[in-house]
Image (tube, helix red, strand yellow):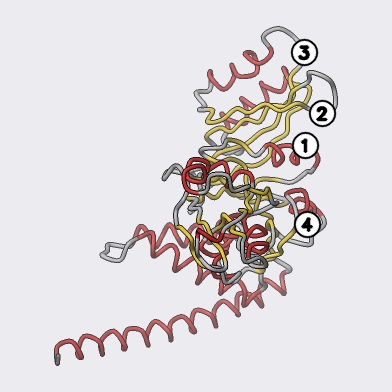
Amino acid sequence: MKELEKLRKEIDEIDTKILNLLNKRSDIVLNIANIKRNKQAKFYSPERERQILERLTNLNKGPFPNETLKVIYREILSASLSLEEPLKVACLGPLATFTHLAGLRHFGASASFVPVGSIKDVFDAVETDKADFGVVPIENSNEGVVSYTLDMFMDYDLKISAEIMLEISQNLLSKSGDKSKIKKVYSHPHAAAQCRRWLESNLPGIPVLEITSTAKAAEFAAREDAAAAIASELAAKVYALNFVEKNIEDSRHNFTRFLVISKEFPKRSGQDKTSVMLSLKDRPGSLYSSLEPFKKAKINLTKIESRPSKRKAWEYIFFVDMEGHIEDSKLKKAIEAVKDNCLYLKVLGSYPHGGL
């Protein structure tokens, strides 16, 4: 017991040092904020945050795990930025959606999240400077692309500044936590699709009512004794719901990719991808001709998605993801060569792979 008390005392002393160092760090942050304010410089620098995280994870020799280190420092960076000027981040509301969770993962809990009603509203908030950034879903590993998000890039001149990969865990929540009392289930259609087999096996004949978000589903279930919702663990806490069953998704390898949108995209990090939107001239072999410059430059295309342009019958818009940054000379030359086969081409953003 004496040895245990001695070790606990050492931990207390270390914690005190960490606290003092965090406050010392905050004093320096406030000094930096004054300098930025005087020079009218931007407070938020994603490049600087990325450098800090990369430096620390490279220095770390363990046994403290790097993934946990990144989570802790993401919150330190978020809290430090809030001392300068809190970031405003638009996301699908109400709070506790998976989009909100993705925003928390990327920006930290000290960011000011602005919940809005639709993906279009997220784009509107960033376009009109009601938010500095927006977070929108773009694709799910099981359910595919979120077409509405792609459509929005045709209507708004906003950029992709980051991507976030979030593992999705769905839960059935209700006021009582008693499965026998459930007469209906509220769910976003994508969430219900991800849990189809579980619902058919465990709640046969129970209607699933579509709702605009998983958090809104939880909000509705919190009002009714006989209702349940498919939502996140965070939604259970926010809306004081009990778990009927955890992890009801049919696949345990369920990820959603989210995009961070803003009015500009970051500089090269060395591990980047670029997204473009293009419309091709209506002639034989136009798609092949447009992709050939990427092949010649040995640029890896990681995704191609097509959507009707909605401006002319049978005209399609192609969304293409590729490895590299628009500032890379070979990628820039390839895109210039592709333009000859396009009615138009728009670079949507260059940003780090998957975020840190």
Residue at point 62%, 42% (across, down): 138
Residue 213 locus on image (x, y percent) = 66, 53
In the image, which disc is placed on residue 282? Answer: 3
Amino acid at dot 2: Lys
Query: Is 198 or 29 nearer to us in this picture?
Result: 198
Amino acid at dot 1: Met
Left or right of 280? Residue 69 is left
Mark 4 packing: few (<14 Cα in 10 Å), some, or many (20+)?
Answer: many
Residue at point 56%, 74% (across, down): 80
Amino acid at dot 3: Asp
Quadrant including the N terminus: bottom left
Left or right of 18? Residue 316 is right
Q: Earlier in the sequence, mark 4 or mark 3?
A: 4
Mark pair 3, 2: CA separation: 16 Å
Name above or below for residue 281 compared with residue 223. Answer: above
Q: Earlier in the sequence, mark 2 or mark 1?
A: 1
In the image, which disc is placed on residue 125? Answer: 4
Q: Earlier in the sequence, mark 1 or mark 3?
A: 1
Closer to viewer: mark 4 or mark 2: 2
Amino acid at dot 4: Ala
Helix, strand or loop at mark 2: loop
Residue 43 locus on image (x, y percent) = 66, 67
Dot 2 and dot 1 residues touching (CB under 8 Å):
yes
Q: Which residue is mark 1?
A: 154
Query: Is 147 or 282 nearer to us in this picture?
Result: 147
